[in-house]
Amino acid sequence: MPYSGDFFKPETLVIRQQYDANASLSNMLTVKGTVIELVFTKPIFWILCSLHYMLWFLKEFHHCRENGVKVESTSTCTSAYKVFHDYPLRLGDIDMLSALVTFFVVFYNGNCYGRYQ
């Protein structure tokens, strides 16, 4: 509920961000009071982004070299591209994980709906 107490008193308004219908560009670029502000201030977001970019960089740019020449693989080195290409992620590899995620999402939604009622 956007109002607490008396519905018709504007001083009881508890909404942080006021919406102005005439300032559409300003509304789209407002970050304060939104979920974007909450996400970008969490360290876990930046840790996961860094991990993602490190793995992407290793996949794209790690190549084995033999006598200064880039090769696909040697006896002591296998490029990350070759590993990802030779062992793709199959749908069967993530069956249990997707089942658990589905269960927890449904359970969480049930809890949220129960609190809403």
Image (cartoon, rainbow, N blue to C red):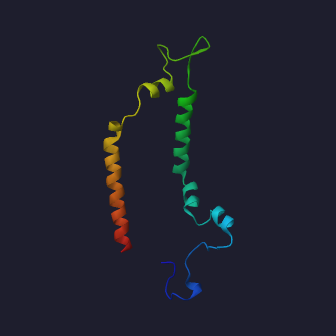
Measured as percent of width and height from the top left, residue 24 is found at: 66, 67
Measured as percent of width and height from the top left, residue 48 is found at: 51, 45
Q: Residue at x 60, y 10 (%)?
A: 67
Quadrant holding the C terminus? bottom left
Q: Residue at x 68, y 70 (%)?
A: 23
Question: Dividing the picture into quarters, in which one does residue 26 lie?
Answer: bottom right
Question: Dividing the picture into quarters, in which one does residue 34 lie?
Answer: bottom right
In-front residue for pair 110/24: 24
Which residue appears farthest toward the top when viewing the image?
A: 67
Number of numbered tags placed on the structure image: 0
Position of 101 with respect to 54 (left or right) is left
In-front residue for pair 47/53: 53
In-front residue for pair 106/55: 106
Position of 11 with respect to 97 (left or right) is right
Measured as percent of width and height from the top left, residue 53 is found at: 56, 38
In-front residue for pair 85/77: 85
Q: Residue at x 36, y 56 (%)?
A: 105
Asked if residue 67 is positioned above or below residue 47 in the image, the reply reads above
Position of 16 with respect to 85 (left or right) is right
Question: Dividing the picture into quarters, in which one does residue 66 lie?
Answer: top right
Q: Residue at x 35, y 50 (%)?
A: 101
Measured as percent of width and height from the top left, residue 111 is found at: 34, 65
